[in-house]
Image (cartoon, grey):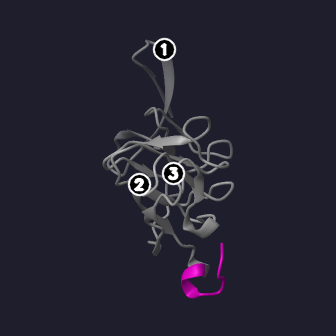
Amino acid sequence: MTLFVKDANTTVQSLATEVDGNGNLVPLHAPAATNAQGVSSVVGPQNPLPVINTTGAVASDGSGTIAAGGSAQALFGGVVPANGFLVQNNSSAALWLSDVGAASAGGASIQIGANGGVFATPSGYKPAGAVSLFGATTGQGFAARRWLSRSQVSGTRSRE
């Protein structure tokens, strides 16, 4: 059975229903996913159910300081993080991060604010290439973590 209701815009919408065990008319619920704007849509081939990595991954430390102010440097020894990463700026000046080429003060680089600014990727994010960091001054400190893939944790591969 289909029940017709009006939404907030007074547009008639169909609502699929069925009779429950007590003989009450109840709506059928379709699996839906909510996007960043809070809009839900039905899950299907064109809109797959989002997958969240719930199997905790071991983190590898990539913390350090800017080795040469004014030059980009590779994070994590140039290894591409396979399962996401995080960088916190522990210095008193901005840092810039890029996972699409060499970081610089601007361009396609992402600015990380001074005194605790953080950039974190979603779980399972794998950038197209190595992550680089740019700071204007030698010695700027940062904390960095990358989450290892299962094969790295078990030792079957030495690099991602």
Q: Earlier in the sequence, mark 1 or mark 3?
A: 1
**Residue range (magenta):** 152-160
Q: Which residue is mark 1?
A: 11
Given contact means CB atoms under 8 Å apart, are the residues at marks 2 and 3 in contact?
yes
Q: Nearer the viewer, residue 115 or 124?
A: 115
Residue found at x 68% / y 54%? 128
What secondary structure is marked by label 1? loop
* Helix, strand or loop for disc 3: loop
Q: Amino acid at mark 2?
A: Gln
Give coordinates of residue 50: x percent, y percent: 54, 51
Residue 160: x and y in percent read 66, 72
Asked if marks 1 and 3 touch (Cβ < 8 Å), the reply is no
Amino acid type, label 3: Gly
Q: Main secondary structure of the magenta part?
A: loop
Q: Residue at x 64, y 82 (%)?
A: 158
Q: Earlier in the sequence, mark 2 or mark 3?
A: 3
Tell me where residue 42 appears, x and y as whole percent.
Answer: 55, 40
Identity of the residue furthest to the top in this view: 10
Task: State which quadrant residue 159 falls in.
Answer: bottom right
Q: Is residue 138 magenta?
A: no
Q: Residues within 10 Å of mark 1 (few under 14, many from 20)?
A: few
Q: Nearer the viewer, mark 1 or mark 3?
A: 3
Quarter of the figure with residue 88: bottom left
Q: Which mark is residue 51?
A: none
Residue type, label 1: Thr
Residue at horizontal 55 percent and vertical 67 percent from the top:
76
Please indicate, yes or no, whether residue 28 appears anywhere in the rendered image. no
Q: Which residue is mark 3?
A: 69
| Residue sitting at x 45%, y 32% | 37
